[in-house]
Image: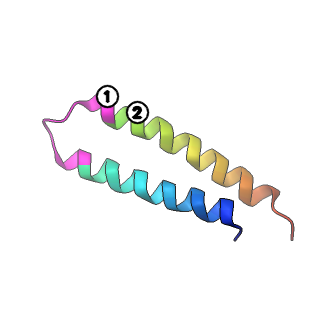
Amino acid sequence: MNDNAQRLKNEIMEKNKLINCFNRKYDLDKSKIQNIEVELDSLLYKYYKTLKNRDY
């Protein structure tokens, strides 16, 4: 896996951890979770494109 794909994977894992943590805090503003989910969607798409376009 190239450096860019690994960096994206690490960011995806971090966003997932944040979402899991925030979901346990019921008094938290839901817009924060939604913003992170949007960022996560973008990262997942970039990760998919990176893996799809890598040279074999």
Residue that badge 2 annotates: 35
Q: Is 52 in front, or is 6?
A: 6
The residue to which callout 1 is attached is 31
Residue 12 location in percent, x, y?
49, 55
> Which element carries disc 1, helix, strand or loop?
helix
- Quadrant, the C terminus: bottom right
Q: CA distance from mark 2 to mark 1?
A: 6 Å
Do residues under tags 2 and 1 come within 8 Å of each other at their CB atoms? yes
Q: Is residue 31 magenta?
A: yes
Residue 37 lies in the magenta stretch: no
In the rendered structure, which amino acid carries the disc numbered 2?
Asn
Q: Which residues are magenta?
A: 22-32
Residue at x 57% of width, y 40% of height: 42
**Position of residue 50 in the picture relative to residue 8 (left or right):** right
Quadrant in the picture for residue 17: bottom left
Mark 1 Cα-neighbour bin, 10 Å: few <14, some 14–19, many ≥20: few
How crowded pointer 2 is (Cα within 10 Å; few <14, some 14-19, many 20+) is rated as: few
Q: Which residue is rendered at x = 73% and y = 60% of the image?
A: 51
Position of 34 relative to 56 (above/below): above
For the residue labelled by badge 2, is the local secondary structure a helix, a strand or a loop? helix
Which residue is depicted at the point 50% across and 55% down? 11
